[in-house]
Image: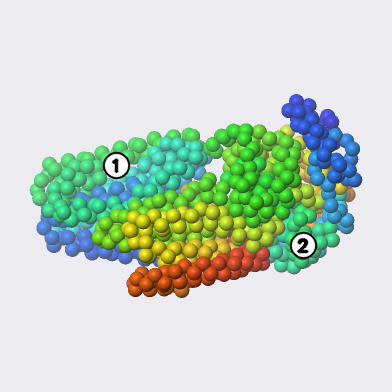
Amino acid sequence: MSLTDPAHTDPAQNVSAQNVSAQNVSAQNVSAQNAPAQADPAQVLPPVRDAHGPALEIRGLTKRFGAKVAVDNLSLTVPSGSFYGLVGPNGAGKTTTLSMATGLMRPDAGDIVIHGVNVWHDLLKAKRLVGVLSDGVRLFDRLTGTQLVTYAGLLSGMDRATVAERTNDLLNLLDLESAGGTLVVDYSAGMTKKIALACALVHAPSLLVLDEPFESVDPVSAANIRDILDGFVKSGGTVIVSSHAMDLVQRMCDHVAVIAQGRVLAAGTTEEVRQGSTLEDRFVDLVGGRRTGEGPEWLRLS
Amino acid sequence: MVATLVKLRFLILANSLKGKPWQIVAVVIGALYGIGVLFGAVIGLSALSLAPTELARTITVLAGAVTILGWIVLPLIGPGTDQTVEPSRLAIFPIPLNKLVLALAVSGVLGVPGIVTSIAALSTAVTWWAHPLAALAAVVCAVVGVFTCVVGSRAVTALSTGLGSGRRFREAKGILIFIPLVLLGPIMIGLTALLRGSLDALPGIADIVAWTPLGAIWSVPGYIVEGNAGRAAAGFAIGLATLAILTLVWRSSLRHALENPARASSPTKNGTRKLGLFGVFPATPWGAVAARALTYWLRDPRYAQSLIVIPLVPVLLFVYSGNMGSQGVLNALGPIVALLLALSIFTDISYDNTAFALHLSTGVSGRDDRLGRVVALGVFAVPVSVLLTVASVWFTNSWQVLPGLLGMVFGLLLSGFALSSVISGRFAFPVPAPGESPFKARPGGGFMLTLSTFATWGGLIVLVLPESILAIVGFVTGEAIYGWLALVVALVLGTVMLVIGVRWGGAILDRRGPELLVELQSNK
């Protein structure tokens, strides 16, 4: 994590970082084998379990909606411990793929294996391994932020003390401590994303699947979230994010896959995929659809 | 512009029905109902042409006044507001305000209720066909009257939404407005009793109403026939002035709405980080579901809607029992409340909407999901139903029916919980989304929901037949043993059903969770 990151010059951030390191004393006892011994926020994240085999392996995944093929025989391997970016134009099948990978939508065909667990054969075990932030899905927004994260924790079958501790840690980590008592329905879009991220993290998954986690999040919060995700990856976890922000993906992710029309056009380490050019240019090359010219005559004002 | 907006409106209606055969059926049945009502109105108005002038005038004035009143009041209390073409969505287009007012008014008239009202209003011309001048005036007045209806309803809706834009205020208003609606029955009984006593006074009332903005415009043809030109002119002037004032009010509130688009209310900050009910229920998945569901009962207006009926049921029964001259009706209080409460969660997952994805992604078992929701409801539904049953028996001093009544109450509650558990785990219903008005209906959705509600009630009544028959035999014969038998049967049978319902519903949910989520997403 970069210490020149603007977020860390923020005094409020320093305060929360101190809180965090105070809590680390108890957390490190449990997570000594995984957590690097440096003061970064990720240390409050609970230890990662079951981190063997590729974090996610998708083979021959297919999903049709009526006549439209949303995901077309898609195969993808996400190595354990990678920060994986999933990019593609609108309607490429990113959300559909991620929904199927996390057990929220049944595939028509194909296998999805998370850390050796076949998702659709052993749904419950797979769900224990995965934390999900879905795009375009509502939250139980009549709960307060604290209540919502607590709810997610209790639903995963954790005990009250653990849930309370982790909820507290996560709200601090995400700068939501002052909004813990506010109903989620009254949150801003960025705060809503963050509380959803807290719900995805509370049961200490080994794989995080985040659909558009940075959409409508302000730059400071986005940087903070990125730090948390970086720390999560450093401690052995795996993160998959889908995003439209190519710049962000190029800087943040060590692996990337370009998806269009339900197929993988390119996949590998970020360096391999972008082949010396920027990810954005490479993306446009692969996906196509760029038009040349300046638009119709009447739109040119001079 | 006017034509474009009218076209837009029908396009939206058509697109929202595309690929949804059940909604089309619902719309068709709704249309048939409208045509039926319309047919009756046209026949009635035509028949009036044979009646004495004074009677015809009395009826057209009163019916017209009620129509305008209905147009203005219904959108406030019912799902009747057709905001298909919402003014705020048009804010970004450069449409001159006056054109917008005209376009929205015309598109309002050309909706289904508008067309029905127009045809009925125009058929007043048939009432006066024997007097050509009056018939001509009737056509003109009908046009003015129909626009008064449409513009009036829009103006009142715009005014009421402009009053408070905060979420809490809006939600509270949505619920409070429900009370007069439920009490409509007793109010009507009171009104009819009043009218029955004063049928002869009706012409007098009509004369007074004819001076008011509601009735003036409809009185014009009648006065023309009677040769009272001055009175007719006055009526026409009042009618026109009404329309003009309503248009001005609507226009100014429309401009206000366009310049101040609705925005989300600012967060209500409070530092408390209390767990609320999550600290009260056991820290298990089902306990968490129960805590969440009960929190929603308290915070979500869609649930409050089913709660607010409960205190009104005794009032309704009291009025009806007085009307029917039998106190026994009051004893139905417990079973009715039990029926309403037990089935209030049969659309529970549909109310969750896509937030249900959290249940799926955390892997909570279907049985815990079902159990938690039943517990949240049972925590207050059982005591409330039992208390109301005992209270009603105490009031009517008929303690001998208490065991039988309690049997029916427990039967309805337990079997109802079971039935709700299975149905809400299997079907996604077109209910209002979180944050929407509890009364907002999707095109045809309200009808489908009503249909499935009645089907569920029917199913429940079959399930509780054993204990109900025993209880009723007890009421009729007066033998206490049947009442006690009903209570025992209800408790045993109800418990068995509840266990089956929670397990079966849970198994369905485990199996079909992802498919249910897809259905919820398409309802979104």
* Same chain assignment for discs 1 and 2: no
The picture quadrant where one finds residue A10 is: top right
Q: Which mark is residue B444?
A: none
Classify residue A9 as left or right of residue B352: right
Q: Position of residue B337 (x, y in %)?
A: 43, 58
Task: Decide which of B302, B321 is in the foreground and name it.
Answer: B321
Question: Would you say B461 lies left or right of B274 here?
Answer: left
Residue sitting nearer the eye, A213 or B188: B188
Image position, residue A123 (x, y; %): 74, 62
Residue B141 left/right relative to B4: left
Q: Is residue B519 visible?
A: yes
**Which residue corresponds to mark 1?**
B243
Residue pictured at 42% horizontal, 53% vertical: B310
Answer with left or right where residue A117 lies relative to residue B25: right
Residue under numbered circle 2: A119
Are the two marked residues, 1 and 2, in contact with CB atoms closer than 8 angstroms?
Answer: no
Give the SS element for disc 2.
loop
Furthest residue in direction left, as rendered:
B227
